[in-house]
Image (spheres, grey):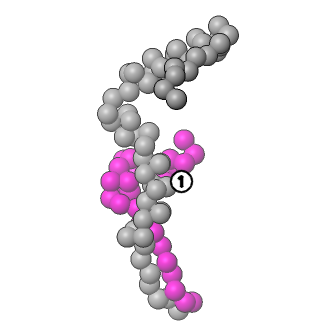
């Protein structure tokens, strides 16, 4: 425990890893929020406060409505579009 991890990566793998680290360093708070949006949408399904039930002619309809910051947080893109990206 507490030991540093090391990697004997070959040159192309090391370059790819360094490129990824540099790309992550350039992310802004807004970029990070954008990346977290699908994760928050997924997690909102686990929140029982997002569910509502209504009676219909065919029985009971239960739906989960994500919080407003998730639902409207991507300038009109739907959750399905976010999951594809």
Residue with the most extreme front position: 1
> Which residue is located at x 65 percent, y 12 percent?
8
Count all numbered tags in the image, as a single digit: 1
- Of 23 and 13, the residue lying toward us: 13
> Which residue is located at x 58 percent, y 11 percent?
15
The image shows residue 73 at horizontal and vertical percentages of 35, 49
Q: Is residue 77 visible?
A: no
Side of 33 relative to 61 (left or right): left
The image shows residue 81 at horizontal and vertical percentages of 52, 49
Disc 1: which residue: 80
- Of 66 and 5, the residue lying toward us: 5
> Which residue is located at x 55 percent, y 89 percent?
59
Side of 60 relative to 47 (left or right): right
Q: Is residue 59 visible?
A: yes
> Which residue is located at x 67 percent, y 10 percent?
10
Residue with the most extreme top position: 11
Range covered by the magenta-colored residues: 58-85
Residue with the most extreme bottom position: 57
Q: Secondary structure at mark 1?
A: helix
């Amino acid at each position: 425990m507490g030991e540093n991890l090391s990697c004997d990566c070959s040159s192309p793998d090391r370059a790819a890893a360094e490129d990824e680290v540099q790309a992550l360093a350039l992310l802004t708070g807004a970029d990070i929020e954008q990346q977290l949006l699908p994760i928050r949408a997924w997690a909102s399904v686990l929140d029982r406060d997002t569910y509502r039930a209504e009676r219909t002619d065919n029985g009971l309809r239960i739906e989960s409505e994500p919080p407003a910051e998730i639902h409207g947080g991507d300038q009109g893109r739907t959750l399905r579009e976010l999951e594809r990206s």
